[in-house]
């Protein structure tokens, strides 16, 4: 049991467990399901897992609003339910931001639209950011915080940002934010604040280590050096994974093979190229159109020539022309080595 004073009220928050807690996703070759089963969804909790009863939960909306409000869980039922299927991805450890981790899944969220709830609070037209607070607090990497605090530009709210209470048709599990969390489809998971308790509208970005110290990427100049500029880790960059064949699989030469996988990006994917020679040459795969904000399946039929080791690669492109870097970035090209006999 840990006592905490927040927003004038003293809340008692029980953590189980206390301190960093995570669950790893399936390896890419096991991500065969279009909708990831809840038991296979990765978990990322920096400070622990707060246990909150539904009837003890509340969400306060304040800051640059004419009508600050505090909602109880039952108040959410007054808004229309909205569902969104979206690719959900952790950008990796904030201490090792460029390591490709493939911590990704594709799930269905149910909740209410933040836009509907905010409309009742009469936001000031001058508000530019929404600060979102989780009920969790404590120490991460030597820094003590009194809440997990993230922000998002207010212009993003229209893109079906949800106050979500279900994952895959069931109440959220404690580790996924029960009873209610933010879901920002198209933004990296770090922005989707779990155990959401407070939202403050403001003119500036949120203070605190999770918005100012970590989760800000250096912008590289044409030569690949740090330009000194920083960009918040918000929008999901184009990425793709090869599901089949699996690493180490043995393929028969001169037989038709199906190479398939998933691709996703905040802006959606309009083309995926595949290489069956380690990136020397590329062929356009077939990619399905995006439904809602879900990941998109791509497939290429090819004939393996061999014998020998073959490195398969996939590279996704957004509508806007962004693509995956070769190495050294969280969305670097996925490579799978197989054997042709
Ligand atoms: N309150 C709170 N929200 C949080 C976190 C956290 O530690 N505390 N972790 C974030 C990170 S880094 C990710 S990737 C997602 C993970 O969501 P999931 O565990 O439900 O998959 O939650 C985000 N929301
Ligand atoms: Mo994350």
Image (tube, grey):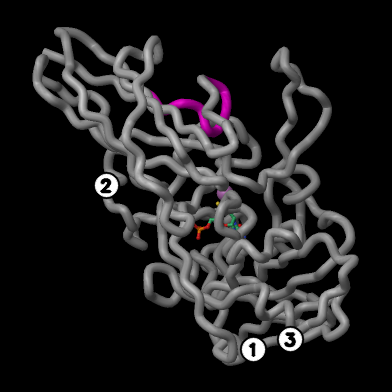
Q: Nearer the viewer, mark 1 or mark 2?
A: 2
Q: Is residue 54 something one can see in this rendering?
A: yes
Label 2 close to label 3 by CB (< 8 Å): no
Marks 1 and 2, Cα distance to the nearest angstrom?
38 Å
Regarding residue 245, the answer to whether it shows in the image is: no
Instruction: Work out whether mark 2 precedes mark 3 in sequence or the reverse, and give the earlier one.
Output: 2
Rendered position, 252 above or below 91: above
In the picture of the structure, the residue carrying the numbered disc 3 is 70
Circle 2 sits on which residue?
32
Quarter of the rendering occupied by the N terminus: bottom right
Mark 3, other Cα within 10 Å: few <14 / some 14–19 / many ≥20: few
> Which residue is denoted by mark 1 in the rendering?
72
Determine whether the residue tagged by mark 1 lies in a helix, strand or loop: strand
Residue 234 is situated, as x and y percent measured from the top left of the image, at 66, 48
The part of the chain drawn in magenta is 327-335
Please state which of the two labelled residues, at mark 2 or mark 3, is closer to the viewer.
2
């Amino acid at each position: 049991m840990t006592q905490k004073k927040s927003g004038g009220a003293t809340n008692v928050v029980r953590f189980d467990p206390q301190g960093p807690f995570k669950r790893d996703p399936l390896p890419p070759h096991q991500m065969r399901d279009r909708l990831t089963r809840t038991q296979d969804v990765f978990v990322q909790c920096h400070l622990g897992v707060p246990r909150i009863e539904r009837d003890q939960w509340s969400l306060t909306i304040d800051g640059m609003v004419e009508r600050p409000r505090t909602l109880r869980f039952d108040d959410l039922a007054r808004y229309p339910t909205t569902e969104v299927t979206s690719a959900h991805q952790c950008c990796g450890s904030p201490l090792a931001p460029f390591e490709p981790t493939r911590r990704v899944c594709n799930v269905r969220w149910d909740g209410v639209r933040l836009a509907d709830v905010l409309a009742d609070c009469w936001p000031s037209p001058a508000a530019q950011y929404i600060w979102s607070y989780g009920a969790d607090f404590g120490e991460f990497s030597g820094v003590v915080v009194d809440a997990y605090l993230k922000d998002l530009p207010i212009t993003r709210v229209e893109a079906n940002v949800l106050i979500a209470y279900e994952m895959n048709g069931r109440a959220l599990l404690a580790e996924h934010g029960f009873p209610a969390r933010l879901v920002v489809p198209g933004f990296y998971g770090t922005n989707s604040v779990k155990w959401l308790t407070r939202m403050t509208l403001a003119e500036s970005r949120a203070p605190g280590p999770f918005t100012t110290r970590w989760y800000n990427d250096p912008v590289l100049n044409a030569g690949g050096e740090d330009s000194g500029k920083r960009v918040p880790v918000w929008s999901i960059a184009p990425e793709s994974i090869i599901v089949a064949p699996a690493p180490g699989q043995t393929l028969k030469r001169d037989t038709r093979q199906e190479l398939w996988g998933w691709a996703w990006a905040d802006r959606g994917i309009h083309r995926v190229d595949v290489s069956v020679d380690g990136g020397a040459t590329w062929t356009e795969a077939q990619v399905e159109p995006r439904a809602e904000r879900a990941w998109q399946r791509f497939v290429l039929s090819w004939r393996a020539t061999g014998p020998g080791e073959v490195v398969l690669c996939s590279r996704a492109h957004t509508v806007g022309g962004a693509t995956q870097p070769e190495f050294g970035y969280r969305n670097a090209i996925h490579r799978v080595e197989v054997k042709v006999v």
